[in-house]
């Protein structure tokens, strides 16, 4: 089965091509094409995953380009991480395809939406089975294109257009880092292959500073894609896209690509203490930074977006603390519960036609399925014991503590408190109390929207049990499989960390309960009457404004300067040359009067002149 | 006869040639231009005859060539006049500066 893993990305590609060619004729039936083909991917992925449990890594490649002694190869590899990612991506993609059938119903570009979903799924699945950096980079960019198209799906909305451009440009900034890192690695090791790069790093063929430099450059690519500080601003804006897209791309898969990249190149990062520390610090900072912004946002999708940024920061913190298993584990559980939360949020938006949580309220009784499912997702992300998020978050906290970063550990703990708080603030504001605005025709979503949510809800509860301190760390042992570069399958941490995580999470929930349900604490208790803190958070620390004033202004200034040079210097030079030639031509054509006598006179006097010269110099022969 | 030096003949030829050249380059009337060209031809003929008499190897050949040149010039003048007349019929003018079709 594993030798046929290359078929998995091709099903969504087929879906993309079919819908591109026949989408207009298929209309609503487009959904079935997309759903069936992603189902095929999912079935194959599950088979591959189960086969990988018992068999060793399968990898194959062929020469793609041969330049002199240089062989660039293409191929695919099914290792533990790749098999797991194949499963996660194809599962979430399949569920989102199904969900969109209901959510996007009636949209006039319905087939186009499914075509784009197919393209994105193809790129993402191709990315996670790439055996070398070059192939990874190609799919990495394709994923970016898919994201761009889907964010800008409502292209007639100015915000959506701007958000799509912003997402593309911000991630491109990171991609430049990745590209330079990739080329430097190639320069040092003469290969793009992961295995050969790791072998060269292992053998000490690459100097320490070079490893640090390339690792950090590649991490910059991951920073862009995974919305880490300081390139995080595109992710909340990307919420302008349709909600299923937010669930698929901006929660479960594409934003996890950065984490995947760091995990896939983990032996390289593990060889540099500085690189790991950079990742850990940026991850922890992003986690608390985004969580604090999430505390005050009023758009349901933006709260979830900031929580995504924050959770991705957690994963980076785990990887940076050498907690390979913890990072990948959280990537998996987060994919399930965050996709669930986004789909549930989509269901809420579908029902009340607004995204502002201040206008919602009292939906618990009206949305009998969505409400409990949203609660499951909220409990999971808050880290309440027994659900998946609890186990993976605990792993991360242990990894941060054991990795020797007590400060980062406490930052992560505070972020966990904030996460529990803002998620339950969201829950209480949306589902409890009374409706705060007039809501007509509030109805539960159709079955093809609720079934994917139920499946994700089940996974959000049970997914954590594959790797627990109580029932054995099956996932961790399997992922590491005795590879010393990846660390241990399970890191034993002090028991108080688990207790602290639980206490912090419950405290966050209780605090949110007091503030937004019982209302025994006023909402402005912390910020006080001055409201400065609240304003700063509401404006996302003015990062966008800061970029507008510095980077954007600088780039614009530079562009104007370059334009000036182009218009006046380059164009002036060109015009000058053209003018000289034209002037010469005009003079020449003026001399051609057609008057025989003029020609005769010119010929005669020229001859006379020649004779005079000849007489004076005596000819050139002498 | 022999008292007249060769330079006098050559000077006469030169003067004739210059008059012819001046006329050919400046006159507007094409007939005058043709006549001027004849003048230049005849200046050449004088040169030929002069050098056949006073040259390094005097012989009759140069004078025969002069006779040939005169007859050819007569034929050429006839052809030239014929072209001029047909031109006059189509263009209704003999002014040489109006005949500038070469320009276009």
Image (tube, coloured by chain):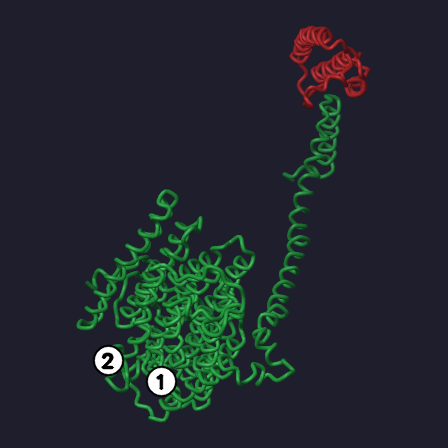
Chain colours: A green, B red
Q: How many other residues sit within 10 Å of disc 2, few (<14), some (14-19) or many (≥20)?
A: some
User: On what subunit does the disc labeled 1 rest?
Assistant: A
Determine whether B15 is above or below A71 in the image.
Answer: above
Say left or right for B98 vs A226: right
Q: Residue A394 got which mark?
A: 1
Q: Give residue A469's quadrant in the image.
A: bottom left
The location of residue A269, given as percent across then percent down, is 38, 78
Q: Are marks 2 and 1 on the same chain?
A: yes
State the residue at coordinates (44%, 77%): A313
User: For the point 26% across and 72% down, which residue is it?
Assistant: A80
Residue A114 seen: yes
Q: Is residue A206 above or below residue A576?
A: below
Residue A131, position in %: x, y? Answer: 30, 66
Q: Is residue A36 left or right of residue A180?
A: left
The relative height of residue A210 versus residue B59 in the rendered view (above or below) is below
Tell me the residue that label 2 is attached to: A474
Specify the quadrant that holds the C terminus of chain B. Answer: top right
Q: Quadrant of the N terminus of chain B?
A: top right
Q: CA distance from mark 2 to mark 1?
A: 16 Å
Q: Circle 1: is it few (<14), some (14-19), or many (20+) Cα within 10 Å?
A: many
């Amino acid at each position: 089965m594993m030798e046929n893993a290359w078929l998995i990305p091709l099903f969504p590609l087929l879906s993309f091509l079919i819908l591109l060619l026949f989408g207009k004729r298929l209309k609503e039936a487009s959904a079935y094409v997309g759903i069936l083909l992603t189902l095929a991917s999912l079935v194959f992925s599950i088979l591959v995953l189960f086969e990988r449990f018992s068999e060793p890594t399968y990898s194959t490649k062929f020469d793609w380009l041969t330049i002199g002694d240089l062989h660039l190869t293409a191929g695919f590899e099914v290792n533990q991480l790749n098999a797991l990612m194949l499963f996660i991506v194809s599962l979430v993609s399949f569920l989102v395809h199904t969900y969109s059938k209901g959510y996007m119903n009636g949209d006039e570009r319905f087939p186009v939406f499914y075509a784009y979903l197919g393209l994105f799924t193809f790129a993402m699945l191709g990315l996670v089975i790439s055996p070398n950096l070059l192939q990874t980079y190609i799919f990495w960019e394709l994923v970016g294109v898919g994201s761009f198209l889907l964010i800008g799906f409502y292209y007639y909305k100015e915000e959506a257009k701007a958000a799509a451009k912003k997402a593309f440009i911000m991630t491109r900034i990171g991609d430049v880092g990745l590209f330079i890192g990739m080329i430097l690695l190639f320069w040092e090791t003469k290969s793009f292959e992961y295995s050969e790069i790791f072998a060269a790093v292992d053998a000490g063929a690459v100097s320490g500073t070079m490893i640090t430099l390339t690792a950090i450059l590649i991490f910059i690519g991951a920073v862009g894609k995974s919305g880490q500080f300081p390139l995080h601003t595109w992710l909340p804006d990307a919420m302008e896209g349709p909600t299923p897209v937010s669930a698929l791309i901006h929660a479960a898969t594409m934003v996890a690509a950065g984490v995947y990249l760091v995990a896939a190149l983990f032996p390289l990062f593990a060889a540099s203490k500085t690189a790991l520390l950079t990742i850990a610090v940026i991850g922890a900072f992003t986690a608390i930074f985004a969580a604090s912004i999430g505390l005050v946002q009023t758009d349901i999708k933006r709260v979830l977006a900031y929580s995504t940024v924050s959770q991705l920061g957690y994963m980076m913190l785990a990887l940076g603390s050498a907690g390979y298993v913890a990072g990948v584990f959280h990537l998996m559980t987060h994919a399930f519960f965050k996709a669930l939360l986004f789909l549930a949020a989509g269901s809420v938006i579908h029902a009340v036609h607004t995204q502002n949580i201040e206008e919602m309220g009292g939906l618990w009784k009206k949305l009998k399925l969505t409400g409990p499912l949203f609660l499951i997702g909220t409990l999971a992300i808050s880290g309440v014991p027994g659900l998946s998020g609890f186990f993976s978050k605990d792993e991360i906290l242990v990894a941060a503590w054991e990795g020797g970063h007590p400060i980062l550990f406490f930052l992560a703990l505070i972020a966990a408190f904030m996460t529990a708080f803002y998620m339950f603030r969201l829950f209480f504001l949306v589902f409890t109390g009374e409706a705060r605005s007039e809501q007509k025709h509030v109805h539960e979503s159709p079955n093809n929207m609720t079934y994917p949510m139920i499946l994700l809800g089940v996974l959000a509860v049970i997914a954590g049990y594959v790797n627990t301190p109580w029932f054995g760390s099956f996932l961790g042992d399997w992922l590491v499989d005795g590879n010393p570069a990846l660390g241990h399958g399970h890191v034993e941490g002090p028991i108080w960390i688990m207790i602290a995580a639980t206490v912090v999470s419950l405290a966050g929930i209780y605090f949110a309960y007091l503030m937004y349900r019982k209302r025994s604490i006023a909402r402005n208790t912390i910020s006080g009457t001055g409201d400065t803190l609240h304003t700063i958070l509401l404006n996302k620390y003015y990062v966008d404004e800061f970029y507008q004033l510095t980077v954007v202004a600088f780039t614009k200034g530079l562009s104007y300067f370059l334009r000036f040079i182009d218009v006046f210097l380059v164009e002036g030079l060109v015009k000058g040359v053209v003018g000289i030639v034209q002037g010469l031509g005009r003079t020449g054509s003026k001399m051609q009067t057609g008057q025989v006598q003029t020609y005769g006179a010119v010929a005669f006097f020229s001859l006379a002149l020649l004779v005079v010269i000849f007489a004076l110099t005596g000819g050139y022969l002498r | 006869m022999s008292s007249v030096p060769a330079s006098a003949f050559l000077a006469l030829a030169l003067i004739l040639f210059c008059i012819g050249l001046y006329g050919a380059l400046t006159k507007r009337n094409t007939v005058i231009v043709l006549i001027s060209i004849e003048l230049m031809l005849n200046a050449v003929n004088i040169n030929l005859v002069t050098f056949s008499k006073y040259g390094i190897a005097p012989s009759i050949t140069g004078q025969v060539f002069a006779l040939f040149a005169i007859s050819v010039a007569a034929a050429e003048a006839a052809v030239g006049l014929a072209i001029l007349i047909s031109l006059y019929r189509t263009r209704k003018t003999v002014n040489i500066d109006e005949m500038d079709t070469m320009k276009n």
